[in-house]
Image (cartoon, rainbow, N blue to C red):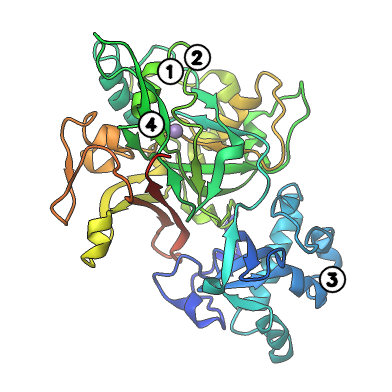
Amino acid sequence: MINSTHDSTMNSWVGSANHPETDFPIQNLPYVYFDRSGADGDGGIGVLIGDAVLDLTRCREDGLFASEELGDVAWTLQKGAAVSNLFDLDQETLSAFRRRLVALLRDDCDEPTRKIVERNLISASDVRFDIPCEIGDYTDFYCSIFHATNVGTLFRPDNPLLPNYSWVPIGYHGRASSIVVSGTDVVRPRGQGRPDPEAPPVFGPSRRLDYEMEVGFYVGKGNDLGETIPIGNAEEHIFGLCLVNDWSARDVQGWEYQPLGPFLGKSFATSISPAVVTMEALAPFRVPAFERSEDQPGPLPYLSHDENEESGGIDIKLDVLISSQKMRNEGIGPHLVSRSNLKDLYWTIGQMLTHHASNGCNLQTGDLIATGTVSGKDKSERGCLLEMTFGGKEPIELPSGEERKFLEDFDEVILRGFCKRDGFRRIGFGECRGVVLPAK
Ligand code: MN
């Protein structure tokens, strides 16, 4: 899977793409949906390169994608088309398209072609990003054993990890309609909780609002109802990844979650980063699946596959930062709260997808599947405040001198993700941000 498009010596004529710390070097090329500012509806599919967006619809109009090798690509890039138009193209065509984009953006691109490409390049600060496509269904898993153990300890001290955990990837059906793009404000939800178990429940603004650092993946090719997806083919159905903040009202969740799982404690908002980083861009960062301890069973045969064992994991560093109103007023930058890694998930994204379809459930192009909170072994690797503060018992301190048990109004949560490996260019996911607004 590693090929010439991952060559770390390759540079772009777009200067900002060659900065060693950029999320978007020529080796990444994630897809986005964008609108040109002030001209709603004048946008479509773009690709991020350094600090700029390349308008793929206009490139198509300029005839840059009219080769036989690119098959249906040009057709998918109509004005206003969603990024999901690309999701179910076959891998060969997508790889050819990636090679073509690299050729157009490389520093050895011929002058006349470069001139055409250049006029379709817009500064990323001049556009508004949207979610990449209409998301039909959204599922959230619970695949970090560290998160599940920490949270389980708080909710059920005597019985933290339920016996099904090591056998079945646990998940729930989320709410697709309340998925919002990074930068959208999140209104503190109202809900029912029972803070005092001796008193009746109460209804009001959540007092235990939390974030969850997660990664999501988009379904590429779907499966028909009644059909399944063998584990060996799982990744052929995954188009790419994004960052996800699964905002959670812990007081609501703790009261409502038994026996059917999360409901209103989660469905008020889920934020995603706009960039879709392709599986091909991530090829250099593949690692073995999570190494299970001796007392943990191996997966059942339908979730087992050599390739999944050898390279089903992905090494993605995941940062959570918080910025309070006071910090912003005092000119203090966002504070790093945790850094975890996707490679520490107990189940791989391939196993999640295969398990999801294993009953014949039809996954559809553009569905979003998230991993669940990504936490690691150490305290600095806990991907939500519930874990980080032991259910609010041990507040964290912000550089402004403030304390946080859970999120306060006007706090901004910023998620970042990036991949680094010797011999390859660093690639990143951009950001997933959201400010908490007071309850209505
Ligand atoms: Mn979650």
Determine whether, in the image, residue 90 is placed left or right of residue 389. right
Location of mark 1 (residue): 257
CA gap, disc 1 to disc 4?
11 Å
User: Which label lies toward us, 3 or 1?
Assistant: 1
Depth check, front residue: 73 or 343: 73
CA gap, disc 4 to disc 3?
50 Å
Residue 272 place in picture, x, y as percent: 51, 48
* Number of residues whose C-alpha sits closer than 10 Å to that of mark 3, classed few (under 14), some (14–19) or many (20 or more): some
Q: Which mark is first along the chain, 3 or 4?
A: 3
At mark 1, the secondary structure is: loop
Residue 367 place in picture, x, y as percent: 65, 38
Residue 23 place in picture, x, y as percent: 46, 65
Location of mark 4 (residue): 249
* Number of residues whose C-alpha sits closer than 10 Å to that of mark 4, classed few (under 14), some (14–19) or many (20 or more): many
Determine whether, in the image, residue 23 is placed left or right of residue 323. right
Location of mark 3 (residue): 66
Count of numbered labels shown in the rendering: 4
User: Which label lies toward us, 4 or 2?
Assistant: 4
Depth check, front residue: 226 or 248: 248
Q: Which mark is first along the chain, 3 or 2?
A: 3
Depth check, front residue: 289 or 363: 363
Location of mark 2 (residue): 260
Res. 49 image quadrant: bottom right
Q: Amino acid at mark 3?
A: Ala
Determine whether, in the image, residue 67 is placed left or right of residue 309. right
Q: Amino acid at mark 1?
A: Tyr
Q: Is label 2 in contact with label 3 (beta carbons under 8 Å)?
A: no
Q: Is label 2 in contact with label 1 (beta carbons under 8 Å)?
A: yes
User: Which label lies toward us, 4 or 3?
Assistant: 4
